[in-house]
Each structure stands twice: as C-alpha cells, then as structure tokens.
Image (cartoon, rainbow, N blue to C red):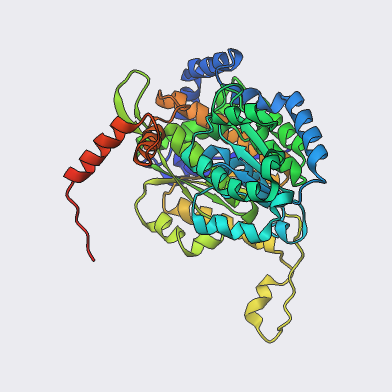
C-alpha cells in the first residue's frame, strides 16, 4: 500500500509568504502539538474514540463474511436504508471499488436511497423483486425521520409480498441495546449487527454498516481493513511532522487562520468521486461548531466542496485560480489505472491530434492534474495532493482512515469537540415536532408560533 501526502504547494517557497506556510513554523507547531497527540492516544486507549480500533476487529469481519455467505443465494437485490453517516461511507466504498455498471450485469443489485424523495424511491421498485431483496436498515436510534420513513415505505411492499414473514428480508444495524429498531427486533427474529456506542455515524464506515454491503458486492473487506491498519501505523507516528494525518489537519487549520475557510476535495479519478462526498460530511459535521471546549463562541469550521478532475477544470477551476483566495484544495491522484491503453490517431490528416498518439488516458488525466496544480501554485493558491498508487480496497481503506484521523487531529487543534453534532440534532428535533411526533408537542407549538409571527416575502 502506497499513499503519500504531498504538501509542497502550501509552502511559502511555492506560493509566497502571504498565503504559504514555512517549513520551520510547521515543524515548531508539530513539536508544540505533542500534548494534543497524547490526548488523542489517551482517548483511544480508554475506548472513548472507537473508530481507531475498528480496522482491528477480526471478529466482526468474520461475522460479516459468514453472514454474507449464508444469505448470498437468497437475494438478488440489496437496498441500503440510511442517511448521512449511515450511507455515505457504504456508497463511497461501492462506487470506488465496483464497476460503474455494476447493476447491469452483477448481483445482488445494489441500491443506496439516502434521501426521502418519493419519486426516487419509487423508481427502485421496478428493478427489484421484493421477495428476493434484502433491506438493510441502518440507524443507531432507529428514530431518524428519513430512515424511519424509508423503512415504512418499503414495509408496505414487504408486507404485501411476504405477509408476517417480512422479517426474513430485513437486516438491522443499530445500537447494541437501545433504540426503536431493537424494539422491532425484539418482536421479530431479525438479524442485527451493532454500531459501537463510541463510534459516531460519520466515523462508522468500517463497522457492519459499511462492511456488509461491501462484502455482499464482492469487495475484499480484509484488504480494506488491512489498508486502514497500515495507515493507522503511519498516523500513529509520534513525530508529528512525519505524521500524514496530523500534517493534513495542521495545514488546513493554519490555512483557516489565513482566511481559507473552504476545503475543496478534487479527485482525479471518477472512482474516488464519492469519497469526496463522504469527506464533505466528515469535515463539515465534525469541525463546524459554535463553541469551543471552554464554551467560548467561535463559529469555527471549513466549508467542504466537492469537485472532480478533469471535469471541473471546465467548471470550477476558473474560480479557484482567479476568484477569492479563500480555499485550500486537496487533489486525489491515482498513479496506476486498471485500464490504460495507449491512444492511436485514426485521422492522420488531423495533425492536431498527433500529440495524443502513444499517450494513455491516465497519463492525460494526471497531466491535467499537474497542470491544475501548477496554475494554482502560480496564482498563490494553496493546494496539496494525496497520492494513491492505485484504486483498490487496500488503498481506499487507507485513505478513509487517513481522513478520519486527520479530522480528529483538526478537532484537537481547533479545541472543539469533533465528535458531536448539536446543529444537526436541532434540525432533527424541529422535524419531529413539525411532523407531530409524540413528546414534541410544546416544541411544535413554539415553532408554529414563531412561523406565524414571521413576515414572508414571496415573489409569484
């Protein structure tokens, strides 16, 4: 496994002293941050932060493999019911490690409806036989409105097709003891996997919620976890200047001090596109906080933006190069592509095509990446590159673990709790109230009163 962090283009030697960082300063800050590293290690040892140890859970990997083997012949379709951290990780694994045309010729067909758009959900039904479909419901509490509503939607068809045997097509991944899904499972013999209480949703890709759909679709989960373990070795280095996760976090938090409050992730690989989507939640929900650990109002955070190279060289890079210098850009680069044949020019009379002769598409894509990085550098725009030797389970596992650990480090550097999400909870409570959930009557009354008093300005 080879994953490298190249931060040459964030240094003052590349982009100048106004926007760049000095090597000496980074080394000094790395030395001064040792107590933060120690605190993270203590939380790891005390099992406060459970995501660190997930790649080492061989018992779970064995249980997942055995479960998948036992149900593989029963189902020709899989529907993943979850939202946010319960879905973005599995989606990233599926799209990065399986063919883009997977559902055209492989089984079980895989569907990840991570929204409650009724038209989108309805469009799944013609492509599945409900009797031969596994519905995997993922929620710690079981009460998340979108997940509960999607379960109820598909239950209509499950009950119609299977009657009282509906439970045979359900799988739950939830809290070990509490929550609404456990109440359902207590009344029906539904197989349940568990999300450890010390693992938050956006850090849960290496739990059963990510491993089950991965294994079911043929992804090598042992290699996935092995890659994460190898990265754990690198991100556990106590020389923080040589620690890729710490340096990623330090560079980003230092750039925030220079007004770079937007973090762009731009994979130069279509397969890595949804890793950028997963990263958006990880970075935004973890670091976007109103108060620090001392209770001071800080309104900190860095807005993550998803881009795709080379596609977005023709849509976003103009802004990145010449617009406000308020961004730090992370490029994901792949060294070796699976299919990468040299091009030939079948139109010899078009001499303008000749420069492509003998080059591969992968070479062109990485040349485009280098050109973009150069344009950013020449315009004093900080950018760094995470380089993967290739896109496979081992490397993807390593990259995901790198970014999770970097997020934990960034929380320490910002002195905020990177593992809660009070802003999200506020929205959940408002949804429960407005939808009439029992126990939220007073909240509903207060919200309705506020809305009635609010002036509206609508153009028709």
Quadrant of the image occupied by residue 169: top right
Q: Look at 56% across and 60% down and name the residue there.
A: 310
Q: Look at 49% across and 50% down and name the residue there.
A: 116
Q: Is residue 119 above or below residue 143?
A: below
**Residue 317 placed where, x, y %?**
46, 58
As rendered, which of 233 and 62 lies closer to the eye?
Answer: 62
Quadrant of the image occupied by residue 344: bottom right
Residue 2 seen in render: no
**Residue 221 placed where, x, y %?**
75, 37
Left or right of 247: which side holds 357?
Answer: right
Q: Look at 34% across and 41% down and name the residue there.
A: 434
Residue 220 seen in render: yes
As rendered, which of 75 and 156 lies closer to the eye?
Answer: 156
Q: Is residue 283 above or below residue 63?
A: below
Which quadrant: the C terminus?
bottom left
Q: Is residue 390 above or below residue 339?
A: above
As rendered, which of 454 and 361 lies closer to the eye?
Answer: 454
Label tally: 0
As rendered, which of 40 and 180 lies closer to the eye?
Answer: 180
Which quadrant: the N terminus?
top right
**Residue 146 placed where, x, y %?**
49, 43
**Residue 111 placed where, x, y %?**
64, 51
């Amino acid at each position: 496994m080879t994953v490298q962090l190249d931060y040459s283009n964030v240094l003052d030697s590349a982009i100048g002293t106004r926007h760049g960082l000095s090597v000496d300063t980074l080394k000094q800050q790395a030395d001064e941050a040792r107590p933060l590293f120690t605190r993270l290690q203590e939380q790891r040892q005390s099992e406060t932060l459970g995501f660190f140890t997930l790649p080492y859970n061989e018992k779970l990997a064995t249980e997942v493999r055995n479960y998948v083997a036992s149900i593989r012949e029963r189902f020709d379709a899989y529907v993943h019911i979850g939202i946010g951290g319960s879905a973005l990780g599995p989606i990233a694994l599926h799209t990065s490690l399986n063919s883009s045309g997977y559902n055209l010729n492989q089984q079980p067909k895989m569907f990840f409806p991570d929204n409650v758009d009724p038209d989108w959900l309805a469009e799944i039904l013609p492509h599945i036989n409900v009797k031969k479909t596994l519905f995997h419901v993922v929620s710690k509490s079981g009460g998340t409105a979108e997940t509960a509503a999607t379960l109820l939607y598909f239950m209509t068809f499950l009950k119609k097709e299977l009657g009282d045997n509906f439970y045979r097509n359900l799988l739950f991944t939830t809290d070990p003891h509490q929550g609404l899904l456990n109440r359902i499972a207590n009344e029906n013999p539904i197989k349940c996997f568990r999300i450890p209480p010390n693992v938050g949703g956006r850090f849960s890709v290496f739990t059963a919620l990510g491993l089950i759909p991965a294994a079911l679709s043929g992804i090598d989960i042992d290699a996935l976890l092995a890659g994460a373990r190898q990265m754990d070795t690198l991100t556990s280095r106590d020389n923080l200047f040589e620690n890729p996760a710490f340096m990623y976090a330090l560079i980003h938090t230092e750039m925030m001090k220079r007004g770079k409050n937007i973090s762009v992730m731009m994979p130069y690989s279509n397969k890595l596109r949804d890793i950028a989507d997963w990263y958006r939640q990880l970075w935004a929900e973890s670091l976007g906080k109103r108060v620090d650990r001392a209770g001071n109002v800080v309104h900190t955070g860095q807005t993550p933006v998803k881009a795709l190279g080379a596609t977005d060289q023709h849509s976003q890079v103009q802004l990145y190069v010449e617009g406000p210098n308020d961004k730090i850009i992370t490029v994901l680069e792949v060294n070796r592509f699976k299919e990468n044949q040299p091009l030939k020019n079948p139109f010899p009379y078009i001499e303008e095509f000749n420069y492509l002769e003998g080059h591969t598409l992968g070479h062109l894509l990485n040349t485009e990446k280098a050109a973009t990085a150069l344009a950013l550098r020449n315009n004093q725009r900080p950018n760094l590159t995470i380089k993967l030797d290739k896109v496979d389970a081992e490397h993807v596992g390593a990259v995901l673990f790198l970014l999770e650990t970097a997020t934990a480090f960034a929380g320490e550097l910002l002195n905020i709790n990177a593992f809660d999400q009070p802003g999200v909870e506020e929205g959940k409570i408002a949804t429960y109230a407005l939808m009439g959930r029992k126990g939220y009557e007073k909240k509903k009354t207060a919200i309705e009163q506020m809305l009635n008093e609010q002036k509206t300005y609508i153009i028709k």
